């Protein structure tokens, strides 16, 4: 039995097996990272599509000053299962209209939202 562990055939089979396991592990890791990037990009695309749809749906009611329609639209959009919260706030960060009416009048708590309001640009974390 001792000679089995010291034979060249056993050492060769073990080393080839370990090399194959390492190769499979590296390809599996690369494949998982590729899929992760793909699904994240798909989620970002879906978020941009929802954002564009919401912006287009509230544009004309806002221009006409029909803010009760804007509030109703935000409440309907907030019912989407993948959406956590949707709010419109003023430049001070006070929520004026929200899909969750309980949040109206409160200050935005998200650091990325406050940064976007301060710089007047889209910041990382709001996409």
Image (cartoon, grey):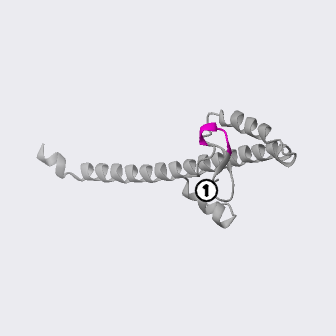
Any magenta on residue 102?
A: yes
Name which residue lies at 12% across and 47% down: 2
Name which residue lies at 55% across and 49% down: 36
In the picture of the structure, the residue carrying the numbered disc 1 is: 113
Residue 21 relative to residue 108: left or right: left
- Counting labels gives 1
Residue 97 relative to residue 68: left or right: left
Which image quadrant: the N terminus? top left
Any magenta on residue 56?
A: no
Residue 57, by quadrant, is top right
Q: Which residues are magenta?
A: 97-103
**Secondary element type, mark 1:** helix
- Residue 109, how many percent across, how many down? 54, 52
- Residue 58, how many percent across, how many down? 80, 44
Vertical comparison of 79 with 42: above or below = above
Name which residue lies at 67% across and 60% down: 122
Residue 10 relative to residue 91: left or right: left
Residue 123 relative to residue 73: left or right: left
Residue 91, by quadrant, is bottom right
Work out which residue is located at the far front of the displayed protein and give it. Answer: 105
- Residue 9, how many percent across, how many down? 26, 50
Work out which residue is located at the far left of the displayed protein and give it. Answer: 2
Depth check, front residue: 53 or 5? 53
Depth check, front residue: 77 or 45? 77
Give the crowd class for mark 1: few <14, some 14-19, many >=20 residues within 10 Å: many
Name which residue lies at 51% across and 48% down: 32
């Amino acid at each position: 039995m001792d000679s089995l562990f010291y034979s060249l055939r056993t050492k060769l089979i073990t080393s080839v097996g370990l090399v194959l396991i390492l190769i499979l592990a590296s390809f599996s890791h690369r494949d998982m990272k590729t899929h992760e990037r793909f699904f994240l990009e798909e989620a970002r695309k879906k978020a941009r599509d929802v954002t564009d749809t919401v912006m287009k749906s509230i544009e004309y009611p806002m221009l006409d000053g029909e803010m009760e329609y804007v509030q109703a639209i935000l409440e309907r959009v907030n019912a989407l299962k993948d959406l956590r919260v949707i709010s419109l706030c003023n430049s001070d960060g006070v929520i004026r209209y929200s899909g969750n009416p309980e949040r109206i009048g409160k200050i935005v708590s998200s650091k990325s939202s406050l940064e976007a309001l301060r710089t007047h640009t889209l910041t990382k974390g709001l996409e």
